[in-house]
Image (spheres, rainbow, N blue to C red):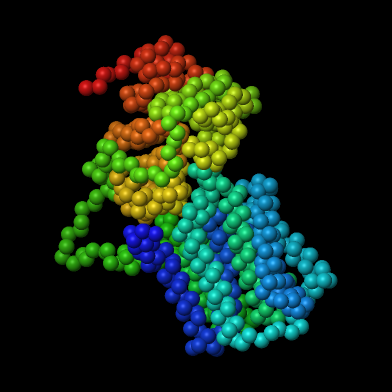
Amino acid sequence: MTRRRFAETTRQALEFERGWLPTAVFFVAMASVAAFGQRSIPTMTDGLLLLIMCYAWNLVGGFLGELSFAHMIFWGIGAYATVEIVNREIPLLPALVVAVVVAATAGALVSWLIKIAGLEGALSLAILTTVFGEIVLSYAEGSSWLGGTEGLLALELPSLGTNAMFLALVALAALAGLLNVAVANTRFGRQWLAIKDDQQAAQVAGINVERQRWIAYVISAALFALGGAYQAYYSGYAIPSVSLSIAPLILVTIAVFLGGAGTSLGPLVGWCIIFGLQVAAGQVSSSPQVSLLAQLIEFGIAIFLLRIIVPRLRGTDLATAIARLPGRLRRRPSTRGESPLPHRSPIAVSDRPSQPIPYQSHAPALPLERAGLAISDVQKSFGALQVLDGVTFVVRPGELVGIVGPNGAGKSTLCNLISGVGTPTGGTICLDGTDITLLPARRRAGLGIGRSFQSPRLFPSLPLTHNLMLGDPHMTERTAEATLRSIGIPNAGRRRGDDAQFFARRLTEVKKASAVGRSVLILDEPLAGLTSEEHAIVLSMARQAADSGACVAIVEHLIPVLAPAVDRIVALANGRIIADGPPREVLQVESVVEAYLGVPHVMEDPA
């Protein structure tokens, strides 16, 4: 690691928002409880077990956005296995490793079942996984070898001492916390959040959705199994009402979404609130009636924070808002005797260079001799509707081709087929002589095929810099920030993928598509909604991609802007190519005029 890279990594680790520092400080404080707060150990034991659940569940429910309520299955595997291991006098650590592997396998199985079920939406998945959990709970309650409703009781537990047990729990919770923070600060977290936001766009960016889901479930299940194992060893029993109950997951879900789902500090912040309310409710519970009232108040406060406070943060989660508060207070200008600073748009015209500065990609160089992108007799129909009918053309490496046509001509469908979002009903698509007609979108992204969409489809859960980094696995945050700043997007690290400025979202998506599209770059109406100056920036980016050897195709309606910038125009109408050639010639073809322009278009010679 170079000195500069080491310094950058150290700086990031010390940033409060990234979670490394506050997480480390928190667990050091927890470890001190063993020495200075032994009266609090029973209470904090319950709390840390809940925190382990929060961290582990956040990997799936927070980052992936999949509301899995089957996770108590993994907790139960760890709990029941531990009691059996102790009762059969099997060496604890090797047997526990086997139990964790079994739980991780169960997590992979749940991931596979979700895949084959093909469910979409958080509610459907929550119902499916709840059914899984209830099936296992019913089986455990009716199983004699698992002790039925009475569960299993450990006959004799080796004594480790109160302090040693608590420090082991702190170490386990710290492991879960640091894994959570590590995911949030690496490509894993970026990919999982992208999957949560838009699976199709994630696949176009080259993300293997099934593999990433599998990894998340395996890690999460393993952590749950370790937590269940500790709880069973600490309490000396494993019973369905404790080890398989869905009730703890309800609290975990509230805590994770309250603090910030899919963030480094969200589970810890949410846990502090929920567990703090629990402890406070327990302190005032002098009778069943008072206990019920305290619990109602506890959940009422949680709902108030979720529904009233969090929405007012304008897309920023509670943990991030708390982490950024000191910086905002430091930057707040004094108003005593001073006039307010004039408002300046985040993207000023003077900030936008006419020639964007390209970043240095670390992707392998493209071969010098390439056949390019070949579309041969491609057809696409939806039922009786024929959208594309025998489309054939070639985009050569280094060539910038414009694709034009009226609405309904099949232009966006063609983009989908090239990028792998859909498959043709006939014909072939080849890249450098290799048939890619049936390859999925993620595989095509791996071959260097990138695209943008008609409406920018960035990932709202990620800042603009992380959106851009998904296009190039070797890009650093500093490079991504500098790249976006060079095209007029400052502070990209703090601006979300659903940034209010359309130009920022559009340009970031084009840059991301260019990073993926080393071989083929498809831009679907990238100029729509932009100013003439912004048109020049986007077109210069497309030309840069072509000059680097990519096959570039731009679908666009703004022919007067497009024609002078491209090498060739392919005109579509009713799903067929009606003209293909130099812009000046194509725009004079009678069928093009009739289908699209209405009057012949005369290109002006450049001054």
Please state if 441 lies on the left or on the right of 138 as rendered. left
Residue beneath the point at 38% across and 34% down: 548
| Occupied quadrant, residue 549 | top left
| Viewport quadrant of the C terminus | top left
How many numbered callouts? 0
Q: Nearer the viewer, residue 169 or 138?
A: 169
Q: Position of residue 573 (x, y in %)?
A: 49, 19
Q: Position of residue 431 (x, y in %)?
A: 52, 30
Q: Is residue 244 above or below residue 445?
A: below
| Viewport quadrant of the N terminus | bottom left
Q: Residue furthest top?
A: 590
Q: Residue furthest right?
A: 144
Please state if 342 lies on the left or on the right of 361 as rendered. left
Q: Is residue 556 visible?
A: no
Q: Position of residue 399 (x, y in %)?
A: 40, 26
Residue beneath the point at 53% across and 24% down: 375
Q: Nearer the viewer, residue 67 or 581?
A: 581
Q: Residue furthest front?
A: 368
| Occupied quadrant, residue 294 | bottom right
Q: Nearer the viewer, residue 31 or 347?
A: 31
Q: Is residue 403 visible?
A: yes
Q: Position of residue 448 (x, y in %)?
A: 48, 38
Residue beneath the point at 45% across and 28% down: 369
Please state if 37 lies on the left or on the right of 292 as rendered. left
Q: Nearer the viewer, residue 117 or 292?
A: 117
Residue beneath the point at 34% across and 46% down: 484
Q: Is residue 189 above or below residue 501?
A: below
Please state if 166 lies on the left or on the right of 570 as rendered. right
